[in-house]
Image (cartoon, coloured by chain):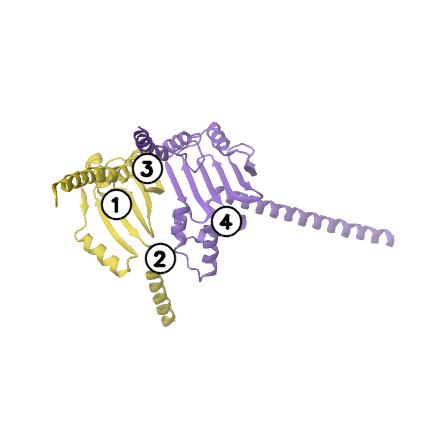
Amino acid sequence: MKNKMMVFVLGAVTLVLPALAQNAPSPLLLPPQVEKDLAARAANVTEVTLNKNMLGFAAKFMDDKDKDQAAVNQMIQGLDGIYVRDYEFDKEGEYSMDDIEKLRQAIETPEWTPMVRDRERKGAEMTDVMVKMVNGENKGMFILSAEPKELSIVLILGSIHLDQLGELKGLSGLGSLGNVEKDVPGLGNVERDAKSKAEEKAKEAQQKAQEKAKEAQQKAQDAGKGGDQ
Amino acid sequence: MSRHLLIPLACALLCVAIVVPWIAHAAGGGGFDPVVRAIEQRYQVHATRIPFMALASLVANRATHGGVGGVRIVEFEHFDKAVDGEELNRMVEEKLGQGWERMIRETSRHGNEQSLIFARPNGSRMGLFILDLDGNEMDVVEVSVDPDHLKETIGKYDHHAGDDSQESN
């Protein structure tokens, strides 16, 4: 009787496990229905799913003798996955703020910390960057970038240093990721914003310095005139 | 062989004959051919197979010291049917069977452009399944790659290319 029960349990487990594995949640952490809806509405969809196995495969093509490639290889070893979803729409308004909110809510768990939240005044463009912190270490990055006719989501899981992120552009076999610094809209925006803000500040400071110098010059001239009189 | 041994042995062989194909099917008995057949049936198109592909695959395998093997290619010409990206993806996923993971999917509603790349790790090798529809032509490719051996071969040619460029300078 015991043996029959054992056989029955083993049989049930054998049948049920593959079914459970197939229904395992997506590593992208996004609601599958939202993903499906967005894909159905988009004119162009790009999905890149690189788990640890795939990254390991790509890493094998790295030349360890090459300093840059060795660095990229080292970085890949620490990654658990790279997931990209890019939806391009024919016209504006094909996705709603509700969709964005659902995407954001899916990732807003205590271990994810918002790093950048960038909004345009009219609300047409927005960028969210979140990092996953575990014991003070960066274990992931989530970028959500919304433009009127494009929505991009990037999720990088694993140990990653922000300054190394650009190294991915040289990763052989990940051509579709392209230049991460440039093509990952969120990150690109963050960097561009930071750069343009720095330039603006520098210009303002320069203008102020010039004005102050002029004022000082004027004052000196006035003082000279006063002394002559 | 005595009769009392023959009967259990025959039963065991029969069980194996029944169970093994069932396990193979459950574990993902799909693959390249089922995908091609499904495309032919769904879109009413005919696959053009490249003659002597097996021989070419063997040569590629030898030339790359096992780096590339199991190359299979079919082409669908005059593919003028509209393709729903989601449906195509679902069909390919289903027919490829278990073990294959989608790596890249690009789909365009305009211009009938679809790209699907699936990968399946298999020990030291990686199986790659690529489907590309561009306008009126669809190509389906399957290849098994051993990154270590392929890297060696590529490195060899890189080395020669480097020598050539030095000589030309």
Name the residue beneath numbered marker 4: A165
Q: Colour of chain B?
A: yellow
Instruction: Tell me the chain of label 2.
Output: B
| Residue at the spot 18% in from the left edge and 47% down from the top edge | B49
Q: CA distance from mark 2 to mark 4?
A: 26 Å
Chain letter, colour purple in render: A
Residue holding disc 2 = B148
Q: CA distance from mark 3 to mark 1?
A: 21 Å
* Disc 3 and disc 2 in contact, CB within 8 angstroms: no
Q: Are marks 2 and 4 in contact (CB under 8 Å)?
A: no
Mark 3 or 1 closer to N-term? 3
Residue at image position (42%, 59%) is A63
Distance in Å between CA atoms under marks 1 and 4? 33 Å
Viewer-side label of 3, 2: 2
The numbered disc on residue B140 is 1
- Mark 2 belongs to which amino acid? Asp
Q: Chain of mark 1?
A: B
Q: Please, what is the three-letter code of the amino acid marked with disc 3?
A: His
State the image coordinates of residue A88 (x, y, percent, origin top left). 41, 37
Q: Nearer the viewer, residue A196 or B150?
A: B150
In the displayed structure, A2 sits above or below B116; it is above
